[in-house]
Image (tube, rainbow, N blue to C red):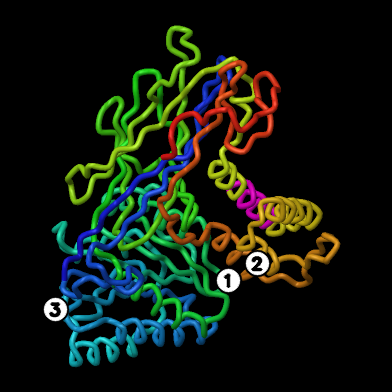
Amino acid sequence: MDTAIQFSLEVNQNKYLRVGGREMHAVLSVTGQGTTGEDDTSTRSDPSRLVEVLVIDCSGSMADPPTKMAAAEQAAAAAINVLPDGVRFAVIEGTLQARVVYPPTGTLVTASPATRKEAKAAVARLSASGGTAMGSWLAAARDLLPPSSTTINHVLLLTDGVNQHETEEELERVLRTCAGRFVCDPRGIGEGWHPPDLLRIAAALNGTAEAVRRPADLVASFRESIRAALTKLLPDVRIRLRTVPYATVTFFKQARPTIQDLTEYATKVDERTWEVATGSWGAERREFHLCLGVEPPDDILEQDRLAARVDLVVDGELRAATATVLVHWTVNMARSARIDLSVSQVTGQEDVRQAINAGCDAYDRGDRIEAHAQWARAVALATATRDEVALDQLRHLVDIEPGGLVRLKENLSQTDIKVSIIESTQNPSHPPVPRGRAVADQICGACGETSPPGAGRCENCGRRFTGDDPPAGALV
């Protein structure tokens, strides 16, 4: 089966900045569509291209309560069952060190009825003891996985604890050696794990962090992660940003389907070129928030100026799908004051996330008043932007009365707080927007300035538009 993906790029922004403005925001939408003619949602990669490593935390804390270890074993067995014949895989036990518990050769094995049965038997013999050093676990997975760009490498990592037996610097060094080599989906269980650890791993390795409220939910989480990995068709897609001399990258974040700051893990190719790894791709859509610092060159006004070019690099090759980020310094305050809808949604979601996390931090340190204030603010922001996903997440923390009154839930557990921090980064992707014909701005017949489609009056001179006023160009 032809597993090629056809990509499209789209930039949404308000290109107009007031005179002296020095910050340009844009939302980059990347859509990958299968070229097989089949339903994209059911497209699967050739199983022989997928390499899967399960990493199971077997530190001493997994024995308290015993249901955690039992749930981990059941979930690992369920994940192994989902692996189709032909997938290469291994299982790693994580404590102070990493140990490959299956296959006994310490390498990779091809999935088959016999190897799945043997792997499940090895998982059933796992026991909890020792400490937690996630960097060593990830390094062991890295060393197992093939370096070839023809394979789709995926790691599913489960932990219940804090990465306390290695320093942050040690973990960071390992993450940088793993970045671009494989995608890792970390999962947290129980009350002892540390949300920043999971979020850090997910951001560096282009995965999705999830928290499990109940041990019984772990089986479904593991199955879904494996099934999602099986839909990936391309192992390595990177976004290349090329700025002009008067523009610099301030930050680059993924906005959908998860909120992740990718700036720290971007590779600076040269003075004006950045590459950001986004991991493996299937038929899907992702959105990214780009912020550029721009310096007005030579006091040029009322002209479109290029600020950055955006390209896709797929398996090391540049794809012919370039998008541009523009900047236009103007004295027209009505133009520069417009807020692009896509940018507004992204920044609004980031504001909600910050309020949720600030409330979680306050609740953790015993400041219920501040927690209530932050979560009430998050409810107000999410309500204003109609962010139903965030409101559903907030309902685990607060009761929202019909009139808008927000009350803290009683007896929130550490699991509730930790899960909320992780869930605040989830921003499910919407279906790809069909490429249609977009109406251009309107030109005022009196002053010649443009206003948005549908505006009743000219934003510059206030003249009412009539049917005789031409659009700013043909329909596109």
Nearest to N terminus: mark 1 or mark 2: 1
> Is residue 103 found inside the magenta-colored segment of the image?
no
Q: Disc 3 residue type?
A: Thr
Magenta segment: 350-360
- Quickly name the residue at label 3: 105
Q: Count the marks: how many? A: 3
Which element carries disc 1, helix, strand or loop? loop
Alpha-carbon distance for marks 3 and 2? 46 Å
Q: Is residue 372 left or right of residue 287?
A: right
Q: Are marks 3 and 1 in contact (CB under 8 Å)?
A: no
The numbered dot on residue 191 is 1
Task: Establish if 359 lies above or below 50.
Answer: above
Nearest to N terminus: mark 3 or mark 1: 3
Nearest to N terminus: mark 3 or mark 2: 3
The numbered dot on residue 145 is none
How far from the left and from the top, in percent, is residue 362? 71, 54
Residue furthest top in the image:
298
Which residue does the image show at 18% across and 46% down from the upper left? Answer: 316
In the image shown, does 471 or 467 lie closer to the viewer? 467
Q: Disc 2 residue type?
A: Asp
The numbered dot on residue 392 is 2
> Which quadrant of the view contains residue 79?
bottom left
Task: Establish if 295 lies above or below 224.
Answer: above
Q: Is residue 281 left or right of residue 286?
A: left
